[in-house]
Image: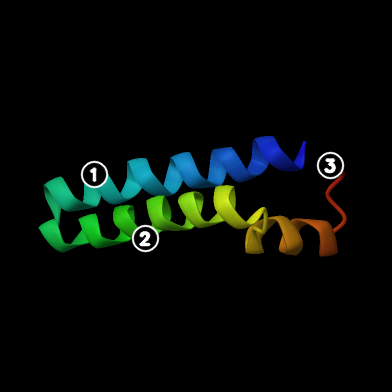
Amino acid sequence: MRNRMIRAFAGTFILVSLVLAIYVNINWLWFTAFVGANLLQSSLTQWCLLEDILKKLGVKS
């Protein structure tokens, strides 16, 4: 459950930032890059801040 929520958060952030980059300001692409960099970091280190937050909120894995 927790992994699905993390993927949903990441996907939502990426899609929202792309829409904001198209309709508001191109600089929103930096947020897209930030989310992508965090996904890469998480895959390399096996640590994800959102996972820790969800765990403390009681979301089951």
- Secondary structure at numbered mark 3: loop
- At 67% from the left and 35% from the top, the residue drawn is 4
Q: Please tell me the numbered disc located at residue 34.
A: 2
- The three-letter code of the residue at mark 3 reads Ser
Give coordinates of residue 20: x percent, y percent. Answer: 22, 52
Give coordinates of residue 46: x percent, y percent. Answer: 67, 53
Question: Can residue 25 be seen in this snapshot?
Answer: no
Of the residues under marks 2 and 3, which one precedes in the sequence? 2
Q: Residue furthest front?
A: 44
- Secondary structure at numbered mark 1: helix
- The three-letter code of the residue at mark 1 reads Val
The answer for how far apart the CA atoms under marks 2 and 3 are is 25 Å
Query: In the figure, is residue 24 to the left or right of 30?
Result: left
Of badges 2 and 1, the one in the foreground is 2
Tell how many labels: 3
Query: In the figure, is residue 54 to the left or right of 26?
Result: right
Please name the residue that numbered disc 1 is placed on. Answer: 19
